[in-house]
């Protein structure tokens, strides 16, 4: 027997659940769709606020100043003249007339070698010349009387000339036994002792002329057009002393290994107070430009790799300007490529792009630092 299915078609509440479920579903769909059709006023205001909020950046107002462009190079100080003392003959040292460190004049005697043998040769040459001269005079008299021939007179004259030459050689040999200073300078080295023996041509001392000093630098080929003979230069020695000089010579033949050109700068050195051989830093003013003084930390690169600075214009929009570093100092750099007056972004330049509207705020710390550093920068230009 099959079970009988119960039906309640005739009951009043049989279809109520269907109507309730349909109403709830319709209400839910309407509520979900209301957010798209009628967006919330609070959400719209927040989105609008996010869209117009500008990024805050720190800026500094900068005014360009005249700056002298310089060519810098490292070099070495050398004496204007350097001479090595070498005796022309060998012999025993019998006297010393100067010591290491003495200032000598041209022709001053430094040392003397033994001259006993040379003096004997000189005496012999003098006697030979006397005899030859008397013989020549006798022959000349005989020729005048017609007793001697012209040939005998010519032979006598040749003997006389030979005797005079031997005497001159003996005198020069005697003089070469004295070692003399070749020019005014300092006897920087002397390796001689009384009683010691020296050979001809052996190095026995050095004389230096260090007034003026000659500063030697190497000029790269790309900077050769900026450096000219006659230009002024500022030379700073490793000891801290500073001198002004002038370019006296620039080679016209590049070194084969470095492709650089030798340049010589003459610097006055009264009394030889500055020693030769010191390392130096040379600055040569080459041109004058208008530039801004900034910290290298605010430099940035464009998408195509150009070096530049980000600034803010009158509409608070970011602008990228390509710049050139004209000069570098310990406390900052001088750059050109910006307008005469510029509002430079000092903090936040990495978070903004060109054309973006920002909220510029004055960087008080940078302003204070610039006021302190500017006199030092200008003082460096004067020095």
Image (cartoon, grey):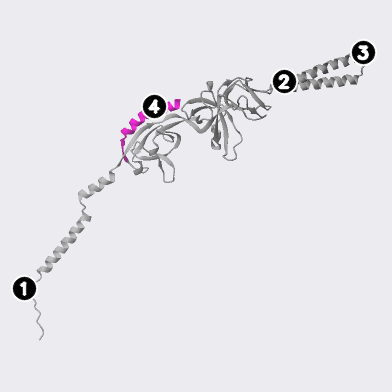
Nearer the observer, disc 3 or disc 2?
2
Q: Nearer the viewer, residue 124 or 167?
A: 124
Query: How many residues crowd around disc 3 within 10 Å: few (fewer than 14), some, or many (20 or more)?
Result: few
Residue 375 shows which numbered tag?
4
Secondary element at tag 1: loop
Q: Horizontal placement of 152 versus 65: left or right? A: right
**Which residue occupies the extreme front position in the image?**
195
Q: First in sequence: mark 4 or mark 2?
A: 2
Residue 119 shows which numbered tag?
2
Q: Which residue is mark 3?
A: 145
Where is residue 327 shown, x and y percent of the image?
45, 33
Residue 11 shows which numbered tag?
1
Q: Is residue 347 above or below residue 160?
A: below
Viewport quadrant of the C terminus: top left
Nearer the observer, disc 4 or disc 2?
2
Query: How many residues crowd around disc 4 within 10 Å: few (fewer than 14), some, or many (20 or more)?
Result: few
Nearer the observer, disc 2 or disc 1?
2
Identify the residue at image location x=63%, y=27%.
196
Q: Which residues are magenta?
A: 358-383
Cα distance between the residues tagged 3 and 4: 100 Å
Nearer the observer, disc 3 or disc 4?
3
Secondary element at tag 2: helix
Cα distance between the residues tagged 4 and 1: 104 Å
Cα distance between the residues tagged 2 and 1: 165 Å
Where is residue 81 shown, x and y percent of the image?
59, 26
């Amino acid at each position: 027997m099959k079970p009988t299915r119960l039906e309640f078609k005739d009951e009043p509440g049989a279809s109520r659940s269907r109507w309730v479920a349909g109403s709830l579903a319709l209400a839910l769909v309407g509520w979900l769709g209301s957010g798209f059709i009628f967006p919330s006023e609070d959400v719209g205001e927040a989105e609008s606020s996010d869209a117009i909020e500008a990024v805050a950046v720190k800026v500094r107002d900068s005014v360009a100043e005249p700056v002298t462009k310089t060519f810098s190079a490292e070099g070495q100080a050398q004496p204007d003249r350097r001479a090595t003392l070498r005796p022309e003959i060998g012999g025993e040292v019998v006297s010393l007339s100067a010591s290491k460190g003495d200032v000598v004049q041209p022709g001053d005697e430094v040392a003397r070698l033994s001259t006993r043998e040379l003096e004997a040769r000189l005496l012999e040459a003098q006697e030979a010349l006397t005899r030859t001269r008397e013989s020549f005079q006798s022959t000349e008299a005989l020729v005048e009387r017609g007793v001697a021939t012209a040939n005998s007179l010519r032979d006598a004259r040749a003997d006389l000339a030979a005797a005079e030459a031997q005497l001159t050689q003996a005198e020069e040999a005697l003089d070469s036994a004295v070692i003399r200073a070749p020019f005014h300078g300092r006897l920087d080295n002397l390796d001689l002792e009384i009683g010691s023996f020296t050979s001809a041509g052996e190095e026995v001392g050095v004389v230096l002329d260090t007034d003026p000093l000659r500063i030697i630098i190497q000029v790269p080929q790309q900077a050769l057009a900026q450096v000219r003979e006659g230009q002024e230069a500022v030379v700073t020695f490793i000891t801290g002393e500073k001198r002004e000089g002038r370019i006296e010579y620039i080679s016209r033949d590049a070194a084969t290994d470095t492709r650089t050109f030798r340049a010589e700068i003459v610097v006055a050195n009264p009394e030889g107070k500055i020693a030769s051989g010191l390392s130096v830093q040379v600055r040569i003013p080459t041109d004058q430009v208008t530039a801004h003084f900034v910290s290298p930390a605010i430099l940035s690169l464009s998408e195509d790799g150009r070096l530049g600075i980000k600034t803010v214009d009158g509409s608070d929009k970011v602008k990228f300007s390509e710049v050139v570093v004209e000069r570098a100092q310990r406390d900052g750099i001088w750059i050109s490529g910006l307008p005469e007056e510029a509002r430079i972004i000092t903090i936040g330049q990495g978070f903004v792009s060109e054309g973006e509207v920002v909220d510029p705020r004055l960087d008080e710390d940078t302003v204070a630092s610039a006021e302190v550093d500017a006199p030092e920068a200008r003082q460096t230009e004067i020095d």
